[in-house]
Image (cartoon, rainbow, N blue to C red):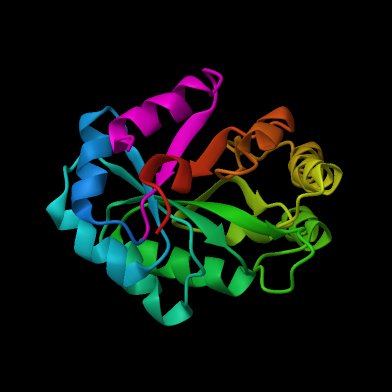
């Protein structure tokens, strides 16, 4: 059976130099994360607040933690309060963004986030539609943020074997990013496009993804 280190090396070796690997470590023990860390990986992602809060003190301080799960409003302060979350990728509403901004201001930090888009066909996915995201930026709502930096967009393709559908979903996310940048020339540091998982990350990269979120291909199935 392949080790975490060998699987990590294989995935990392398949990525273009400009694409960052986010190792999705949710539901895997700290020992597995340590194996990937020892092999050179520094960005890890979790989807549950209680899990990431528990893992942070067990692991090296230079890990860049990403949060990728649906963030409940009553968990915002616990997450932001760790002061260790490099990027919250899953901001799926303006209300959640405001709560993160308030918590970050109270902590005296600037919290980096991504706006999550919903383009997939499943109703279970969270996020803003492309039109809602564009309206948020063109209306200037983002100017009211005090302690939050929106660094780009995150999204998922439909869970299907239809490659054309997956490619179209990724292109929709990428195109939304381009429309936002064109409509808001004063937007700064809006350059992350987080798309693609173990089964579809090559298609995401073809559409312009800058960050791929890979779990199973590194840590194995849970």
Q: Nearer the viewer, residue 53 or 188?
A: 53
Please provide percent x and percent y for residue 196. 61, 43
Q: Does residue 126 show up magenta in the picture?
A: no
| Vertical side of 148 occupied by 36: above or below | above
Q: Nearer the viewer, residue 191 or 20?
A: 20
Instruction: Kindly identify the residue that appears in the image at 25 percent across and 28 percent down.
Output: 39
Instruction: Kindly identify the residue that appears in the image at 38 percent across and 68 percent down.
Output: 48
Instruction: Kindly identify the residue that appears in the image at 60 percent across and 34 percent down.
Output: 191
Image quadrant containing the N terminus: top left
Image quadrant containing the C terminus: bottom left
Magenta span covers which residues? 1-26
| Vertical side of 179 occupied by 66: above or below | below
Instruction: Kindly identify the residue that appears in the image at 34 percent across and 63 percent down.
Output: 80
Asked if residue 32 lies left or right of residue 57, the reply is right
Q: Does residue 7 show up magenta in the picture?
A: yes
Q: Nearer the viewer, residue 182 or 113?
A: 113
Please provide percent x and percent y for residue 179. 82, 42
Please provide percent x and percent y for residue 192. 58, 38
Q: Is residue 106 visible?
A: no
Q: Quadrant of residue 122?
A: bottom right
Asked if residue 122 lies left or right of residue 62, the reply is right
């Amino acid at each position: 059976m392949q080790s975490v280190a060998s699987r990590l090396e294989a995935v990392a070796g398949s990525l273009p130099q400009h694409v960052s690997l986010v190792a999705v470590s949710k539901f895997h023990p700290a020992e597995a994360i340590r194996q990937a860390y020892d092999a050179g990986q520094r960005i890890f992602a979790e989807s549950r607040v209680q899990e990431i809060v528990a893992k942070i003190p067990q692991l090296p301080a230079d890990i860049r933690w990403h949060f990728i799960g649906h963030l409940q409003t009553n968990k915002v302060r616990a997450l932001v309060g760790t002061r260790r979350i490099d990027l919250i990728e899953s901001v799926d509403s303006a209300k959640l963004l405001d709560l993160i901004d308030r918590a970050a201001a109270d902590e005296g930090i600037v919290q980096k986030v991504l706006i999550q888009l919903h383009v997939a066909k499943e109703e279970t996915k969270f996020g803003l539609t492309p039109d809602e995201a564009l309206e948020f930026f063109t209306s200037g709502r983002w100017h009211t943020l005090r302690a939050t930096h929106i660094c780009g967009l995150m999204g998922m393709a439909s869970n299907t074997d239809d490659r054309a559908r997956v490619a179209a979903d990724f292109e929709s996310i990428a195109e939304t990013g381009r429309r936002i940048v064109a409509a808001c020339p004063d937007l700064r540091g809006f350059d992350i496009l987080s798309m693609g998982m173990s089964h579809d990350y090559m298609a995401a990269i073809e559409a312009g993804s800058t960050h791929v979120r890979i779990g199973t291909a590194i840590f194995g199935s849970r």
